[in-house]
Image (cartoon, rainbow, N blue to C red):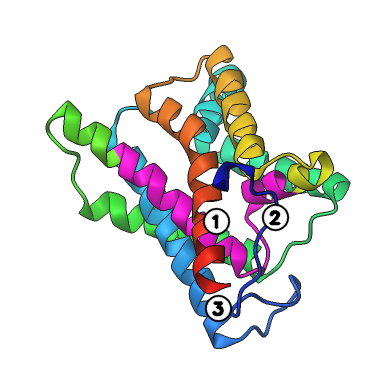
């Protein structure tokens, strides 16, 4: 079952080395395509206005208690997470850099172009679809093996340390982050819970399907 998957699969377009700044065209394409999907899906969750993602909730909570802006807090948290990579033996790569650039761009573009639904049911549907798209995008770009983003690297690093399924590790991270954010005063909504509990299984399902289809 996909919920028990523990490793990032390798397929024909996966890079043989994470630290590879001259990847095959197909590898670069799928890396960028996955990141575009990731940014688009995360933007849909934001646009739904029924709850921010767990990491945004934590950034909001820290912002309330520190007086720093959410943007600055988000940057600091990303740096701290990258620092934790040293203990998890994670390797950055081209994907780590493009993760920041492409996802940020897609967030801005999608938020500017896609309106918030009028009915609550449609908002729920938008958030659910957004979480699923983030899961698919994550699976595609992680399989490219050119380096994860800060949070995905935390996930894969902890998975290697604990040998637990990817779905369980990611869910634990997201639920923990959301809980800390809520304790610090961040706002939690239905969308937050959908993301926290759903993103781990969605990433695992994406990895499982791609592995089954292409291997």
Upstream in the sequence, badge 1 or badge 2?
Answer: 2
Looking at the picture, tell me which residue is in the foreground, 41 or 100.
41
> Is residue 184 toward the left or the right of residue 39 in the image?
right
Q: Position of residue 77 (x, y in %)?
A: 66, 38
| Whether residue 158 is visible | yes
> Is residue 191 toward the left or the right of residue 208 in the image?
left
- Name the residue rendered at 56%, 60% in the picture: 99
What residue does disc 1 label? 208
User: Based on the displayed image, in which of its 4 quarters is residue 121 positioned?
Assistant: top left
- Tell me which segment is drawn in magenta: 127-156
Rate crowding at label 3 as few (under 14), some (14 to 19) or many (20 or more) other CA atoms within 10 Å.
Answer: many
Q: Position of residue 136 (x, y in %)?
A: 45, 56
Residue 133 higher or lower than 60, as above or below: below
Looking at the picture, tell me which residue is in the foreground, 97 or 90.
90
SS of the residue at dot 1? helix
As measured in the structure, the alpha-carbon distance from the residue carrying label 3 to the one carrying label 2 is: 21 Å
* Farthest residue, direction left: 118
Q: Are marks 1 and 2 in contact (CB under 8 Å)?
A: no
Residue 101 higher or lower than 152, as above or below: below
As measured in the structure, the alpha-carbon distance from the residue carrying label 1 to the one carrying label 2 is: 10 Å
Q: Position of residue 1 (x, y in %)?
A: 57, 46
Q: Nearer the viewer, mark 3 or mark 2?
A: 2
Rate crowding at label 2 as few (under 14), some (14 to 19) or many (20 or more) other CA atoms within 10 Å.
Answer: some
Q: How many marks?
A: 3
Residue 168 higher or lower than 203, as above or below: above
What residue does disc 2 label? 7
- Name the residue rendered at 87%, 45% in the picture: 87
Give the number of the disc on residue 28.
3
Q: Position of residue 142 (x, y in %)?
A: 60, 61
Majority secondary structure in the magenta region: helix
- Name the residue rendered at 48%, 62% in the picture: 35
> Is residue 93 toward the left or the right of residue 128 in the image?
right
């Amino acid at each position: 079952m996909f919920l028990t998957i523990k490793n990032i699969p390798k397929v024909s377009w996966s890079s043989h080395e994470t630290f590879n700044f001259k990847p095959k065209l197909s590898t670069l394409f799928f890396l960028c395509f996955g990141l575009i999907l990731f940014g688009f899906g995360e933007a849909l969750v934001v646009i739904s206005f029924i709850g921010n993602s767990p990491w945004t909730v934590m950034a909001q909570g820290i912002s309330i208690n520190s007086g720093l802006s959410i943007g600055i807090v988000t940057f600091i948290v990303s740096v701290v997470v990258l620092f934790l990579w040293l203990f998890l033996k994670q390797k950055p790569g081209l994907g780590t850099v493009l993760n920041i650039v492409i996802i940020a761009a897609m967030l801005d573009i999608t938020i500017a172009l896609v309106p918030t639904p009028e009915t609550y049911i449609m908002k729920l549907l938008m958030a659910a679809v957004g979480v699923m798209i983030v899961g698919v995008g994550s699976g595609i770009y992680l399989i490219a093996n050119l380096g994860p983003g800060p949070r995905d690297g935390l996930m894969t690093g902890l998975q290697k340390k604990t040998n637990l399924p990817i779905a369980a590790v990611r869910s634990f991270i997201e639920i923990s982050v959301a809980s800390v954010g809520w304790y610090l005063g961040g706002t939690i909504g239905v969308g937050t819970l959908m993301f926290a509990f759903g993103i781990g299984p969605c990433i695992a399902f994406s990895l499982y399907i791609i592995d089954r289809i292409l291997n």
